Structures are given as structure tokens and as C-alpha cells.
Image (cartoon, rainbow, N blue to C red):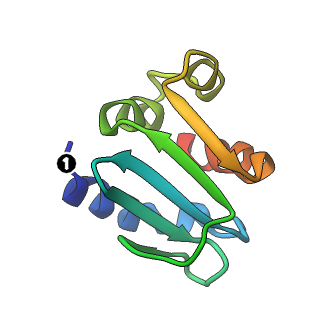
Amino acid sequence: MNIDQIEAQMRARALNFTGLGALVKFDFGSGDAVFINGRSTPPAVSRTGDAPDTTLTISPENLLKLAEGKLAPTLAFMTGKLKVSGNMGVAMKLANMLED
């Protein structure tokens, strides 16, 4: 899955992020990132954004596994496949939204 496909998938699921109330950055490395602005209604998805409340560092492959329910968020975090910086509460809320 490439960055264009990830952005398109997140746009398609934007309403899942309603009520997030935070700006989240998904950092895929190599300068690739997608931002979800959960402060706006409907939530906005873009490749650039202001300073995020929470940054999730994850590979595109592992993000796909999370979204498909093939990788549990807690396991991903505990095994280093998912790194979180910033507000951990936002990350936990987001994990539930990704699984829907």
C-alpha cells in the first residue's frame, strides 16, 4: 500500500474519526505522512498539517493490518511496530476508530 492509497482509505473513513478532537500524524518514514484533523467536522485528511497532538509511527503494511483487524493495536505497540509520541489517550481512542 502506498501513501496515495493510504490517504484515499483514510478519506473514505473520515467520518470514523468524528469526535476525535485532536490532530494526529501518521508517520510512515521517508518523509511520508498523513494527518487527520479530528478537530474539524467532518474530519479532514491531508499530507500536511500543524503540530500534531499525537504522532503514530508505523509502516504502511502494519497500518493495513491494524485496519483489517489482523494486528491488535496493543500488540503492535508492545512489539515496536507502532510508536506513539504525544497524547497517549488520543492514540487509544484512535485505535478503536481504526478497527471499525
Badge 1, how many Cα within 10 Å: few under 14, some, many 20+? Answer: few
Q: Tell me the kind of residue under disc 1.
A: Asn
Residue 4, image x, y percentages:
20, 60
Query: Badge 1 is on which residue?
Result: 2
Image-quadrant location for residue 8 = bottom left
Q: Residue at x 62, y 72 (%)?
A: 38
Along the line of sight, which residue is nearer the eye, 25 or 73? 25
Secondary structure category for the residue under label 1: loop
Looking at the image, residue 6 lies above or below residue 80: below
Q: Residue at x 35, y 70 (%)?
A: 47
Residue 3, image x, y percentages:
24, 55
Residue 80, image x, y percentages:
54, 22
The residue at the far bottom in this view is 41
The residue at the far right in this view is 89
Position of 82 with respect to 8 (left or right) is right
The residue at the far front in this view is 30
Image-quadrant location for residue 70 = top left
Q: Quadrant of the N terminus?
A: top left
Q: Quadrant of the C terminus?
A: top right
